[in-house]
Image: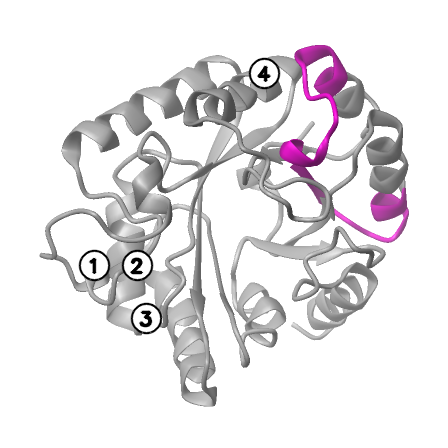
Amino acid sequence: MKALSSLRAPAVAGVIREKTVRAAIAEIKNCMYHGADMIDLHMSCLENSDTESLRKIVEGSKLPILALNYNNLYAFEKAGLTEEERVASFVRAAEAGAAGIDMQGYTFHRPSKSGFCGEDKYSFTKGNPKEVVTDEAIISKQCEFIEKIHSLGSEVLLSCHPGIPMNCEQVVDLALFLEKRGPDIIKIVTTAPTEEDLMESIRTMTVLKKEIKTPISYHTNGKWGNLSRIINPLLGGQIAFCVDRYSESSTIEQLDLQTVKAAVDAVERIK
């Protein structure tokens, strides 16, 4: 199974938010037949995410799996997991053979999920960003955890969802700051409430490809964010996160898998 960081960019990821092992495997097959390169598995949606259940899903997939836990259930109700329980699910996923895990930027410091808690001394700490941690003790724990996941044979995608608009300088500075922790892939998601924010995100992606050595995914949410979900991957972002079939469990802002795959293939033909 290929490492996630070595997949040809942009890798088209089929997002799986299912309740049971059988449903997850079935949806993985749908994603595979519709052209996905990898799977993005939301563990917190599963009714049972013990190691054996996760191993069945991994073994039932011909595509590499990125396992994540955003602490949300199937219909986006809060799962109510403690930080210890959430982190433990990453270890189980690695032990089950997942190609990688998505470690959010607030890991080991739950208060940072809702807003910035540190000293405002970096360009990217302006505007009260979420999931941004600058405390060296917490960063050290994250680095140790990344090493632990690596020792289990899995990669780490370090994700950060600031939840605010950011300019190019801020995003690049944040990416460089995250890169020092040694992840295999970096993911940053800001917001684009205006057309100008969207255009800035596109410019930012071109700069990120030049400045960041680690494979990186960057897109925006919000009113103008959707276009960045396809344009930025085509400009060199590592992963495009897509939905194969929309349902109540889907992140509606994510793009249709078959449409994205067709766009990626079309661009490849004309390069």
The mark nearer the N terminus, 1 or 4, is 4
Q: Give the range drawn in magenta.
A: 30-55
Residue shown at 83% from the left, 62% from the top: 258
Tell me how far mark 1 sits from mark 4, CA to CA. Answer: 33 Å
How many residues crowd around disc 4 within 10 Å: few (fewer than 14), some, or many (20 or more)? many
Q: Are the two marked residues, 1 and 2, in contact with CB atoms closer than 8 angstroms?
A: yes
Question: Where is residue 46 shown, x and y percent of the image?
Answer: 73, 30
Question: Where is residue 186 shown, x and y percent of the image?
Answer: 42, 47
Which amino acid does the dot numbered 1 rest on? Thr
Tell me how far mark 1 sits from mark 2, CA to CA. Answer: 6 Å
Q: Are the two marked residues, 3 and 2, in contact with CB atoms closer than 8 angstroms?
A: yes
Secondary structure at numbered mark 2: loop
Q: Residue 129 carries which label?
A: 2
Q: Identify the residue under disc 1.
A: 125
How many residues crowd around disc 3 within 10 Å: few (fewer than 14), some, or many (20 or more)? many
Quadrant of the image containing the N terminus: top right
How many residues crowd around disc 1 within 10 Å: few (fewer than 14), some, or many (20 or more)? many
Q: Which mark is residue 166?
A: 3
Task: Please name which of the two marks, 3 or 2, marks the residue nearer to the observer.
Answer: 2
Residue shown at 47% from the left, 24% from the top: 87
Secondary structure at numbered mark 4: helix
Number of numbered discs present?
Answer: 4
Which amino acid does the dot numbered 3 rest on? Met
Tell me how far mark 3 sits from mark 2, CA to CA. Answer: 9 Å
Q: Identify the residue under disc 4.
A: 92
Left/right of residue 217 with respect to residue 108 in the rendered view: right
The mark nearer the N terminus, 3 or 4, is 4
